[in-house]
Image: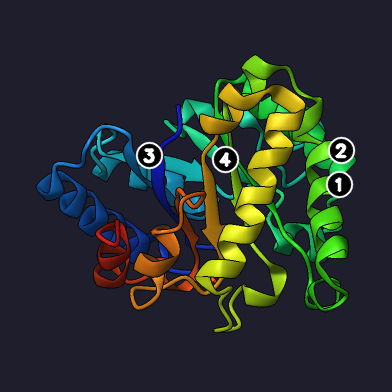
Amino acid sequence: MRKLIVAGNWKMNTSVAEGVELAKKVSAYAEQKNLPAGKQIVIAPPFTHLAPVAQVINADKVILAAQDCAATKNGAYTGEVSASMLKGLGVKAVILGHSERRQYFKENSEILLKKIKLALEEGLDVIFCVGETKDQREAGQSLYFNVVKAQLVDTVFTLTKEEFSKIIIAYEPVWAIGTGLTASPEQAQEIHEFIRKEVAANFGDEVAQNTTILYGGSCKASNAAEIFAKKDVDGGLIGGAALKADDFGKIIDAR
Ligand code: PGA
């Protein structure tokens, strides 16, 4: 079902104690808001914070997500955290394909598809990030459309319809992440509409209408409302502005 989601990606920020406090505030906010059905708040703290955060949030009001999971099920993979370990902690969703993972950790579509499948096998929802770099954007529409399309074709478009129903797409232009540069509402709408059309071409109209597509990249309290107002934008994946409960609350209220 198409939802309205405001998701906070904390990245590698906050101490455990700070993260627990932030999670408590977000959870209290969500409880007090009595959110309508179909509107969801997601937080994605670092791995180390997941167990203590799970203890302090109201899981009916706030969905706990991880920022990544391993591309293998279990075994001798030092430092990795598997989808089933996350599931065991009360994690309900995982962010995959974030541009920082693609850029700094060289994650490509092949690796990402393995991660997606393992996450889905554990019953986790997947927030799958796509987006073009600054150079690709500057090369013109047909290029950045093709970049985003290829990121989908090589991964989530290979899934079955049923599997794809667990995928939330996050369009995150790399040039807007953490830079203070935001896509204009029109730029966001243009590519969200394109993504929805591609989903329709691959899985049919009904699936496309039920797909949740988030915007991410310097989304904050001051610009969230106008971006979320666009018809193909179903909320946001928020980095920096998710680290302050008040700012995150304002973004939750933006639509
Ligand atoms: P930002 O990050 O809001 O800090 O730009 C967004 C993200 O990377 O998900």
Q: Between disc 1 and disc 4, whose residue precedes?
A: 4
Disc 1 residue crowd, few under 14, some 14–19, many 20+, Cα 10 Å: some
Residue 10, percent from left and from top = 48, 62
Q: CA distance from mark 3 to mark 4?
A: 10 Å
Residue positioned 58% across, 82% down in the render = 181
Q: Do labels 4 and 2 touch, CB within 8 Å?
A: no
Q: Which residue is mark 3?
A: 63
Disc 3 residue crowd, few under 14, some 14–19, many 20+, Cα 10 Å: many
Of circles 4 and 2, the one toward us is 2
SS class of the residue under badge 1?
A: helix
SS class of the residue under badge 4?
A: strand
Residue positioned 86% across, 54% down in the render = 146
Please state if 2 lies on the left or on the right of 54 as rendered. right
Q: Between disc 2 and disc 3, whose residue precedes?
A: 3
Q: Tell me, for residue 94, which label it has, or none.
A: 4
Q: Is residue 93 above or below residue 238?
A: above
Please state if 159 lies on the left or on the right of 127 as rendered. right
Q: CA distance from mark 4 to mark 2?
A: 19 Å
Residue 61 found in image quarter: top left
Q: Between disc 3 and disc 4, whose residue precedes?
A: 3
For this rendering, which residue is in front, 111 or 138? Answer: 138
Q: CA distance from mark 1 to mark 4?
A: 21 Å
Which image quadrant shows ligand 1?
Answer: bottom right
Please state if 223 lies on the left or on the right of 75 as rendered. left
Q: Which residue is mark 1?
A: 150
